Image (cartoon, grey):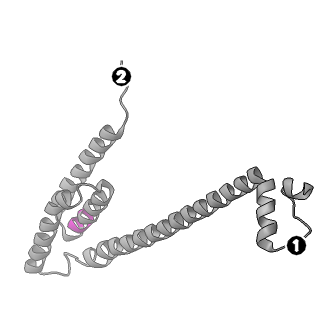
C-alpha cells in the first residue's frame, strides 16, 4: 500500500513498460515536462535550420545562374559585336537592339537597382565596342544618378 501511495511500482503484479512509465512520469512530472518541451524545441529548431539551409542553397543556385547568364550576355554576345568586323547595316541593327534594350532597363528592373546598374554597365561596354561611346556615356550617367538616388533614399536622416 505504501508503494502505491508513493507512486512507485507495486510488486504484487508483473511490471509492464506502460505501468512503469506511468509511475515514473507521475513521480517526475516537472522533469518529464521540461525534457518534452526541450525535445519539441529541438525538433522545431532543426526543421527551421533545414528549411533555411535549403533556401540558402536555392538562392546560391539562382545567383550562379543569374551570373552565368549575365556573363554570357556581356562577354559572349555583346562583346562579340565588333565595329571593325561588321558592315554598317549590322552595326545599325546591333545599335538598334541595344537602344531598345537600354530603354527597357529602368522599367523592367525598377525594383532591382543593382541588377539594372550591372546591365547598364554591360550595355555601356557594348556601345563602346560598337563605337557608340556617347550612348554608353549616357548609361554611365544614369548609373551615377541612380546610385546617388539609391544612397540618399536608403541613408538614415538625422532629425534636429
Give the structural element (helix, strand or loop) at label 2: loop
Q: Nearer the viewer, residue 90 or 32?
A: 32
Instruction: Relative to 146, say whether 157 is above or below.
Output: above
Q: Quadrant of residue 96?
A: bottom left
Q: Which residues are magenta?
A: 124-128
Residue occupying the point 20% across, 81% down: 85
x, y (%) of residue 93?
Answer: 10, 76
x, y (%) of residue 50?
Answer: 55, 67
Marks 2 and 1, the one that precedes in the sequence:
1
| Left or right relative to 122: residue 15 | right
Q: Residues within 10 Å of mark 1 (few under 14, many from 20)?
A: few
Residue occupying the point 70% across, 54% down: 33
Task: Answer whether residue 48 is magenta in the image.
Answer: no
Looking at the image, is mark 2 or mark 1 nearer the viewer? Answer: 1
The quadrant in which the N terminus is found is bottom right
x, y (%) of residue 25?
Answer: 76, 59
Q: Nearer the viewer, residue 158 or 19?
A: 19
Q: Quadrant of residue 106?
A: bottom left
Q: Which residue is mark 1?
A: 13
The quadrant in which the C terminus is found is top left
Q: Nearer the viewer, residue 123 or 87?
A: 123
x, y (%) of residue 56?
Answer: 49, 65
Instruction: Relative to 64, say whether 158 is above or below.
Output: above
Q: CA distance from mark 2 to mark 1?
A: 79 Å
Instruction: Relative to 13, say whether 154 is above or below.
Output: above
Residue occupying the point 79% across, 68% down: 19
Give the structural element (helix, strand or loop) at label 1: loop
The numbered mark at residue 27 is: none
The numbered mark at residue 159 is: 2
Q: Main secondary structure of the magenta part?
A: helix
Amino acid at each position: 500500500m505504501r508503494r502505491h501511495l508513493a507512486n512507485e511500482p507495486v510488486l504484487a503484479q508483473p511490471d509492464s513498460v506502460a505501468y512503469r512509465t506511468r509511475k515514473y512520469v507521475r513521480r517526475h512530472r516537472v522533469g518529464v515536462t521540461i525534457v518534452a518541451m526541450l525535445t519539441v524545441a529541438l525538433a522545431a529548431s532543426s526543421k527551421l535550420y533545414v528549411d533555411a539551409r535549403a533556401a540558402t542553397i536555392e538562392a546560391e543556385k539562382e545567383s550562379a545562374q543569374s551570373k552565368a547568364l549575365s556573363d554570357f550576355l556581356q562577354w559572349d554576345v555583346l562583346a562579340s559585336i565588333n565595329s571593325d568586323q561588321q558592315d554598317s547595316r549590322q552595326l545599325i541593327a546591333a545599335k538598334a537592339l541595344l537602344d531598345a534594350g537600354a530603354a527597357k532597363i529602368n522599367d523592367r528592373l525598377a525594383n532591382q537597382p543593382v541588377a539594372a546598374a550591372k546591365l547598364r554597365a554591360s550595355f555601356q561596354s557594348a556601345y563602346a565596342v560598337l563605337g557608340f561611346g556617347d550612348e554608353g556615356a549616357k548609361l554611365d550617367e544614369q548609373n551615377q544618378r541612380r546610385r546617388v538616388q539609391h544612397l540618399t533614399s536608403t541613408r538614415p536622416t538625422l532629425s534636429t
